[in-house]
Image (cartoon, grey):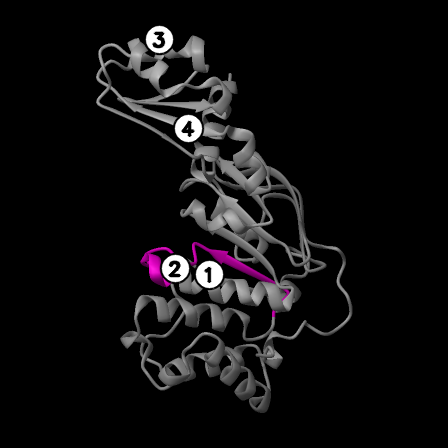
Amino acid sequence: MAPSSFLLPLKGPPMSQTSIECQGLCKSYGAHSAVAGIDLAIAEGEFFGLLGRNGSGKTSTLHMLATLVRPTAGRAIVAGHDVVRQPVAVRRAIGMVFQDSALDRNLSVEENLHFAAALYDLPPDVSRGRIDELLRLFELADRRRALVGNLSGGMRRALDIARGVLHRPRVLLLDEPTIGLDVINRRTIWRFLDRLRQETGLTLVLTTHYLEEAATCNRVVFMSKGRFIGSGEPSRLIAELGSQILDIESNSVSEHAEILQPLLGPPIIEGDHLQFRVAADEFSVGDVQRRLQPPPRAFSIRQPDLNDVYVWLNHRHRAARP
């Protein structure tokens, strides 16, 4: 099936190769530094992830890029426009999907989109065509007259994204777009986003708690206390971590750490849990189990993922601080 006209590549003069650029970007609230001087360059059409715990600086960074908060210091350029000196131009060039829905629950699906079109000053004939196409794309055509308050969480989130791309932005900022959704609805949302990304060349910038969702990003950056602590292509970061992760739950954490550290290197210790990075050619399950006396409560070996990358990066960052 041929893509709809909405999904055809965006027309207009070519943009610079860099869609977003930050230099020394800072945001402070009194004595608290939410973002502490980050440098960043995101290419046009890139799928980019900002990852980290609550309070790490992800949302503050996104809000500065969206001109919702003013940087304390540094500079940010979005779609060729300075976020401080040209905020209106930036807002025209971006779409934003917030953690909390921006929809009016007392209006219908269609009314919400028409209201958004009016805010962007889209002519009625243009907005009607785009709304029809987006409702088909996001599988909401049969719910166009339904009140938003009567939609499922997944449908509301799909409508939030449709609203965010109605004006055909160059950049779409997604702040926890699937938070609170079940696995099926999360997969549906990512199917929609993947189609938008693949067929329009849209630049996507994502924050998420669900780090497995960021595995398809072109690049990710991990943040902690307002700083970048690691970055790269997800598959490369996972491969560099190690071929396997050994998890141990034990009543004798100190003893087991002392036994295994000469064999496997230093672990991460959290409460009654130990975690080791393991290379396949240096690891024997039987050997490790024979060494552990008294036996641990639980013992597992598994493939690493982005959650493990973040845990180890954060551990290394804490250990390196004076």
Q: Amino acid at mark 1?
A: Trp
Task: Please tell me whether mark 4 or mark 2 is closer to you in this view.
Answer: 4
Q: Residue placed at 59% from the left, 87% from the top?
A: 126
Q: Secondary structure at mark 1?
A: helix
- Looking at marks 4 and 3 on the same chain, the residue that comes earlier in the sequence is marked by 4
Q: CA distance from mark 1 to mark 4?
A: 28 Å
**Proximity of marks 4 and 2: CB atoms separated by less than 8 Å:** no
Q: Amino acid at mark 4?
A: Ile
Residue pointed to by mark 3: 259
Left or right: residue 249 compared with residue 308? left
Q: CA distance from mark 4 to mark 3?
A: 17 Å
Q: Residue placed at 53% from the left, 77% from the top?
A: 119
Q: Which residues are magenta?
A: 169-186
Q: CA distance from mark 4 to mark 2?
A: 27 Å
- Looking at marks 1 and 4 on the same chain, the residue that comes earlier in the sequence is marked by 1
Residue 245, label in figure: 4
